[in-house]
Amino acid sequence: MAARDLHGPKPPWDKGFSIIGKSQRKVDGLTKATGEALYTDDIMLPGMLHAKTLRSPHPHATITRIDVTRALAMPGVYAAITGSDLPERYGVIPWTQDETALAVGKVRFIGDPVAAVAAIDEDTAIRALEAIDVEYALLHPYLEPEDALTRVEPKIHEDRKNNISKNVKLEFGDVDGSIKGADLVIEDDYSFHGTTHAPIEPHCAVARLSPDGLLTVWSSTQITHYVHRALAKVLGVPEQKIRVIQPCLGGAFGGKSDPFSLEFCVAKLAMITGRPVKMLYTREEVFYCHRGRHPMKLHYRTGAMKDGRITGVDAKILIDGGSYSSFGLVTAYYAGQLLTGPYDFPTYRFDSTRVFTNKPPCGPKRGHGSVQPRFAFEVQLDEIACTLGIDPIAIRRKNFQGSNTQTVNGQRITSNGFAECLTAVENASGWKDRRAKLPYGRGLGVAGSMYISGTNYCVYPNDMPQAGVQIKVDRSGAIMVFTGGNDIGQGSSSVVRYIVAEELGLPVEHVRVVAADTDLCPVDLGAYSSRVTFMVGNATIDACRKLRKLLVSAVAEKWEVPDARIQMSLGEVVDLEDATHKMTTKDAFQLAEAKFDTLGSTGAYNTPELGGKYRGGTIGASPAYSFTAHVADVRVDVETGRIHIDKIWVAHDCGRALNPTLVAGQMEGSVYMGAAEVVMEHHRVDERGLHSGPSLLDYPIPTSLDTPEIESHIVESVDPEGPYGAKEAGEGPLHSTIPAIANAVYDAVGIRLRHLPFSPAKVLAAIAELTSKTKAAE
Amino acid sequence: MLRLPQFGVATPTTIAAALAILEGNDKAAVLAGGTDLVPNMKHRIATPDLVLSLEGVEEMRGIRVDGDTLVIGAMTRLDEIAHDERVRSWAPVLAQAAGIVASPQIRRMGTLGGNVMLDTRCRYINQTHFWRKSLGFCLKKDGTLCFVVAGGKKCVAAASNDSAPALMTLGADLVFRSAKSERIAKIDQVFGGDGIYNKKVAPGELLIEVRIPRQSSGHRGAYGKLRERGSFDFPQLGVAVRLDTRDKVVADADVVLVALQARPLRIKGAADVLRGTTIGESSFETAARTIADRAHAHCHPMPNIPGDADYRHAMIPVYVRRTLLAAAGLGVAPRT
């Protein structure tokens, strides 16, 4: 696998950028704002049936009998299916496929899909579910990860040796020796509680089987390509007879990355009934689908010298995976692999274990796998700084790894703007004058982080490009771009539009983007791991450069001038040396079409060879890393224990901001989500295996009143391989939100909070403990 | 989206017509805004055959002063009450309580009558039918067990209406009418201790209006609310305070808490402790602390509604004291 044609970070035309770097509208901004955007649930097809899912009321049980006869006999019921109708396993990682569309033989959490029916309307389908007879034999439910770690029988997945999903142990250098030689060692336990994405659009899928056997599935997925592959496998239908389309999407955040039960069920039910079938999950079902951020128990040991320099980091992590693998193999790696920047670790070891439990399955959520370890480490680093009497920003500068280097675990770092990020938040927050000087109850905290811009680990190994783009040139002067990239609100289709407009010298509105339709668009691996801007962006530039060559040569030939004199900008083609030479881009398109025949172009991107030369060394290896620093300003009400997050300054190195408004939007969204995970959100499953409140009333996402003021500072390090130097901005800016708040609480009231979420009760208990310790010392 | 069960709808436009429908129709549910009834129906907690919508009954809307009584129609929107100048000066505690219910959108649908008559809440009941079935159903609906108190035979679902304690401090009267009669009940007498149904209101009776007697010239009031977010959430604790003062000296007082058990709870003897103390002097603050401690000793939150019960207990003195100070103009009533 080699990198496909990189074009470098320079603007396409000598005079600089005319569109890139400026604030632009999103392609779907107006349709969303006016309510005209069509989401999956807006699809209504003639004769369409409605499907519902019967779910397990038990956390762990064997199905001893299941019978859909009574349901099928009901008027208005067209089909009912159970696990035996769709027994083929799937899962996003080919080596850990342990899910079936409907339970086969056993159920593994409360909410596990057991059967599905298609009926004339939803109410009939709901009544039919009540007429499905299921008998269960209850099994021991695993609700704590420690239980799953030590107990082998019963096994949640029978073909496994035990209840361990994945264990990764990697060591780089002599960790024990480096920690032994340190002046200071801080060792402690930390934990993350588990949160979910809560996208406002619930999952929805619609399927239609055409008379000639083409199966079309519309789904609110963020990875069309994997859904396409999974449908073929599970349904036993060749891929060329399946078309998957992602309509407008109402939020995903990682929660729509896996193939889901409903996609297979609507397809199967459409195949059985010959009618289109829709299934829309309720909010409660979205909570059961979950795939949210894993609860983790983390033990960290970090050694440092008196000057603050880190000598080594030793981590042991227990990950509560819930009932299925999902992306869990990657989670176990990311939990360790993504901590090795922006600081230089001379030695590093991690031992991360993901276990199965009888709870809704965890998966990728914004900052997959690395948010929890980042919290633990950045709090530990703060403690080292405070113990040694070093300014927390200074200790981060001291350990900064710099650019064009390699991490201890073999990851290539190219551009790295972390130092600029630190300076930006230091200055903006008034850090030097305010930190440790604010009155009791108020404090500032800092933290830093890094994240990937995609990874070179494709979930199924192949030599084809990770991203492809196709361009159709229209005689009208318009360009249609086709990309498999999934726009999930992050603006990937907008980014494609800006790039094409920049490259071909067009006004942005002359560029239309068709995305995430497997019939129309070349494959892109989808919206995960913050890969789309980087990879689809590069593929778009690649396609444009090939096309531009044709356009330029046709015009140059007509004017009888060298190609280098031709410039295209905002709908016009000009000769740089002769003002009488001028034509519209539309005329240039027609000229080129006459010369070369029908015009089109393709472009592709693939990652270069990256990563350490060891098993798992490519997981977490990215062509470019983004860097972030946060400063949080908090008030702690010592009587109620409430943490009020007044303001967060965030600086993010995104390489280059293709549209600064979109980058700032991603930064603000990340901070919003991260802050909520500190003080509010908790995806809790109780001692019975029941979700503690699967609704947006009981799972509190913050309102505008609960959201801190956020000030975003964009840092542009201009990456050598990113499209015009761009890197990711959608996930990185979440990470250090959490430890920055934790460290600010320490500055405010002197308590080290190591276990999320920081509920007011925990804050009060910690303050009381500190007070009694202080009194005892006196 | 959760589906509603099937039901009939009646849309009377007069009180008399509404009462005639209600008479003898004990499977009917009254819709007075719907912000509580509709989700309860989606959860199959309420399964009425008939929904009697009062939306068209204009004579039940509006705020008026009738001599020494402020009269608020049961169908008056919470948002209107929160912003009405007469309510804000006559009964500031009610204006604050109405203005802090749920979210702006819900306050523009929800009514005072709906909030007074709100069903009790519990983490084991306000869930979907699937969830409750997975739990095994609790004794408030469809089951026989209490999951809050192991072995408990009495439902401990909590009154969660912000307006009720406020109206109790104001000595409000509730006017109920049925097809055959009308009665005026002191709000203190209306709430009972059974979480399954916590109101002493007979089938066929409709809450028509709320009457608030004229308060003293030195009347002050405040409502403090513990909840997770700055909007949306039901109270995890609500504190209503009335102070009657003369030249900053307290003459009378009342403190009522909600979101503890099935009925709102009055902190007894608050007036005796506060009477004669002077706002702005230490005597008042000391008295406020005494009442806060008394509330802490007397009230024992159970793990019935969301929020850690021990934490809710620990917050009782803090919220009582802060709300008392807010009523006295010495601070702002807590809103989260």
Image (cartoon, coloured by chain):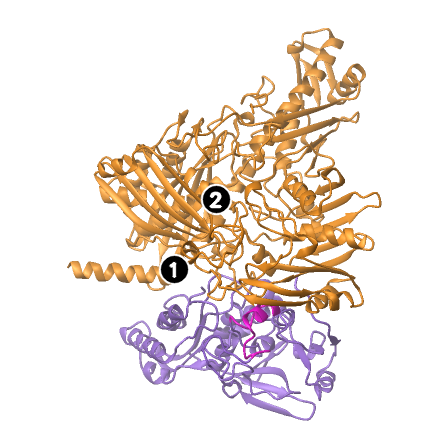
Chain colours: A orange, B purple
Magenta extent: B123-143
Which mark, by number, is residue A331? 2
Label 1 crowd bin: few (<14), some (14–19), many (20+), radius 10 Å = many
Instruction: Give amino acid for label 2.
Output: Thr
The main secondary structure of the magenta stretch is: loop
Instruction: Give amino acid for label 1.
Output: Arg
The x and y percentages for residue A174 are 29, 34
Is residue A142 visible in the rendered image? The answer is: yes
Would residue A753 be found to the left or right of residue A327 on screen?
left
Residue A378 in magenta stretch: no
Is residue A42 visible in the rendered image? The answer is: no
The answer to which of marks 1 and 2 sits earlier in the sequence is: 2
Towards the viewer: A263 or B21: A263
Residue mark closest to the camera, 1 vs 2: 2
Q: Residue at x 67, y 31 (%)?
A: A508
Chain designation of label 1 = A
